[in-house]
Amino acid sequence: MTNTLDDQDIQIFTKSGKHIVGTQISPLLDETWSVWGINSLTQMNSKLILEENGFDSTATYDSTSLNMGSISGNEFNNPSTFSTTYNDMTISYSGDSDRATPTPNFNDRTLDDPGEDPKEIVTIDDVTEDLLIFVTGSGDINDAFEFTVTGSWDFMPEKQTDVKILTDTRPTDSSSFVTIDKTVVDTATLSINSLDLSSQSNAQTAITSIQSAIDTISQHRAYYGAIINRMETTRESVTNHGFQTTQSRSRIEDVDFASETAQLTRAQILKQAAMSMVGHVKTSQQQVLALLNAGLN
């Protein structure tokens, strides 16, 4: 995964809720989780570890096998990686690039500091069970905060099933998916695996079968075109949501600043009033002493 200015983090889970790659919730909360409204283990289970997000109905969050890129999770190793094993899978992870610099730039959700590499890498030698991949962070897909995720496989499993792609998840709403139905296009399914061209009639039958296969593939291409258009619309929606979230956060920060300024002004007024009262008290005491001295004389 390659980031630009804003930090996004790869998170990989098993369907049972085991967190095997990514950044931690506890004891040091990663800022990209906060953007998702997840600040505790309880919120993790109530907002992400849900059946609608692809997890098993009995799944609960478990970070005992979490690969954070190092033992502490506070290091960044790219191009080197830190390896762990889980269920016969060797998992190598470069770590969180936002942890490449010390405080105050450490875990600040930006990648504009020297030494912070925008690329994070995960490699799994052999996937032995279904895995769920999420990308945490603001998710702003625009010029300022764009990120790209690239995946490659040495080979794909023979089992062909429908694919569900998580397109949007928010703290207050249910998750959104795009489901891509399986479209098997091998020669046996298309009935062109045993064409016979030994005679004119057989050749004509083969031509008919090939034309039918071409029509089927054309239908699949039209289907995938519609899916691509739908995902482009979803992309625009997510971009707009990210922009609105950034605006909302800015307004909240402005309100907080105004509130703190008002509190500071109030405190200063009270302090000045208290000092003025103390001055008046001292003056009154001096006047009383002067009158007493005058009476004695």
Image: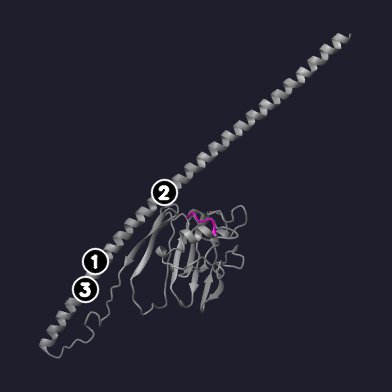
Q: Earlier in the sequence, mark 1 or mark 2?
A: 1
Amino acid type at image mark 3: Thr
Q: Earlier in the sequence, mark 3 or mark 1?
A: 3
Amino acid type at image mark 2: Phe
Q: Is residue 62 left or right of residue 209?
A: right
Location of residue 70 with respect to 126 vertically, above or below:
above
Tell me where the magenta segment starts and ends, as one range: 36-40
Residue ID for mark 1: 222
Spatial CA span between label 3 and label 1? 10 Å
Residue ID for mark 3: 216
At a point 55% along the width and 60% down the height, the residue shown is: 25
Spatial CA span between label 2 and label 3? 41 Å
At a point 51% along the width and 43% down the height, the residue shown is: 253
What element does badge 1 sit on?
Answer: helix
Residue ID for mark 2: 243
At a point 35% along the width and 69% down the height, the residue shown is: 163
Density class for disc 1 (Cα within 10 Å; few <14, some 14-19, many ≥20) is: few
Provide residue 46's location: percent of width, then percent of height: 47, 59
Q: CB under 8 Å between callouts 1 and 2?
A: no
Q: Magenta region, mostly helix, strand or loop?
A: loop
